Every structure is written in C-alpha cells, then in structure tokens.
Amino acid sequence: MQRRTEPRGKSGVLPSPDSIDMRRTALLLDVDGTLLDIAATPAGVVVSPTLRSNLSDLLAQSGGAVALVSGRTIDTLDRLFAPLKAPAIGGHGAEMRPSAQEPALKRRPVSITDPLRRRLHALADIDPRLLVEDKLHSIALHYRLVLQQEAFLKQEVTRLVTAEGADNMEILFGKAVIEIKPKLFNKGSAVSALMTYPPFAGRIPLFIGDDTTDESVFAILPDLAGRGYSVGRTMTGADGTFASPQAVRSWLARLSTHAGRAL
C-alpha cells in the first residue's frame, strides 16, 4: 500500500468538485447520517429521486467505482435505493459487493450468539419506543425516541456483553444508537479489501462518513493514499467537514455535473 505523505487538509476544507477526476477516484459513501438524514426509525429514511439519479450518473462516470459503506445489510441497501444498485459494503464490513453485477461476498461472518441475541432483543421490553434492529451479523439498539434511557441502555448493554464473556464482540456508541458487533470485521478492513478489486484497485479513495462506525475507515485512509471527510462534526482523521447530509447531497450533485462535462 502507498502511504500518503502530503499534509492533511485543515478541518472544514472541502474538495472542489472540479478538482476530482472520477476516472481515478473511488467514491466511498456512508449512508445514514451522511447521504441520508437521520430519521426517528431506520425505516423512516428518505432516498430522493435526485440522489438516486446523481449516484447513478457518478457510477457511470467512474466506471462503477462508487460504493455504499453501511451498517445496513446489502439487501436492505438495494431495497432502499431501488432501482439503483451499487457496489456496497454492508453489515459494518460483514458483506462486500465489489460490483453491482456480482453477488455479495460474506467476509468471514461471525454471528452474535443466540443467548446474547435474545437478551439484547429483550431490552425492547423497557419501552415500546426503543427499536432493536437485528442485522444478522450485528444488532443496533435505536433510542432516538427514548433518549432518557441512554445511560441505562449503555450500562445494560455493556453488562450483557461482559456477562456473556463475548471477548470477540465490541460495542459502538453512535448517534442515539448502540451497535453490538463482532470485532473480526469493520468498515475499515472491508474498505481495504474492496480497494483490491476492480474497478476500485489503483484508484484514490475518497470517503465520507459521520459516526463512530466510520472511524475505522478514517484510520486506514493514509495507507491507501486516500482522503476522508466527516459530516456534522470534526472527526479524527478527517480532512474536512460537511455541515450536514444535505450539504453532502448538494456536493454530489455538483460533482456529477462536473464529472459528466469532463468525460
């Protein structure tokens, strides 16, 4: 791998769309909180026709080197963005699809044990507004509608995982969500693997992400000579920060227009 040697950009400095050659760039995009505004529930997010169109244009202009990098499963991403189908990393790295024309690859999947899964699901009994999202290879507890339970949930999830003796599990605290997943994989290791497949191989990765689960990608970008940008807040390893998902979508719209002219 080639390690980037030039200085990191200052926080808040974003790349101009006309400075990016999509024929040499691999565009890697987190979904919730980056492309899409966070909703009260995972099912409540909205993918606009304009966003689908811009992503479709960028896929064509880049020769297929645009990937969604998400905690959601690839099947869920396909339903969410339909009829658009893109290369993707799903389940925080448990799944990978280098090409939209190929089936998803399972990356050494490790499942949460059934007893721990049942105990995590049972937490929904605390309050009907607490949503347990089971993604097979990980479980997310969404408490956006019951923020007063945050401290208790963090303590209880930590207790359950510790009591299980699940040394191979990790707990990630995000934006009104707690993720429990195996340590064996993460978004960063999956991005490193994706960058060895065509059409991503040999390109410069440009990643945009917003939350705790994206930190592993920011961490490996220097080894790939890539750049990363956070959304809504400054994050360690980010070269700049978009103000919001709307700002990301507007930037992608400008990028798709510029890239189309450059062809």
Image (spheres, rainbow, N blue to C red):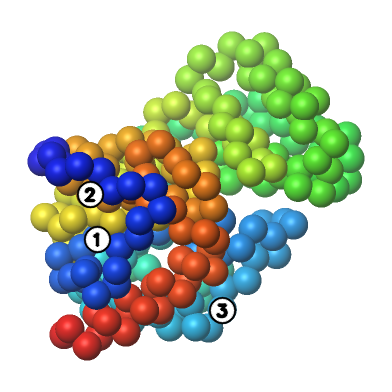
Q: Label 3, on which residue? A: 48
User: Which residue shows up at 20% across the image and 42% down it?
Assistant: 7
Mark 2 neighbour density, 10 Å: few (under 14) some (14–19) many (20 or more): many
Q: Quadrant of residue 163?
A: top right
Name the residue tied to disc 1: 26
What is the spatial separation of the Cα atoms under label 2 and label 3, in whole angstroms? Answer: 28 Å
**SS at badge 2:** loop
In front: label 2 or label 1: 2
Residue at 11% over, 55% down: 202
Which residue is nearer to you in this view: 234 or 195? 234
Residue 156, x across and y down, in percent: 75, 22
> Real-space Cα distance between discs 3 and 1?
23 Å
Viewer-proximal residue, 191 or 97? Answer: 191
Nearer to the camera, 228 or 85? 228
Label disc, if present, on residue 226 of the rendered structure? 2
260 on left or right of 179 = left
**Closest to the observer, 258 or 78:** 258
Residue 59 visible in the displayed image: no
> In the image, residue 258 lies at what x, y percent?
27, 82
First in sequence, mark 2 or 1: give its number: 1
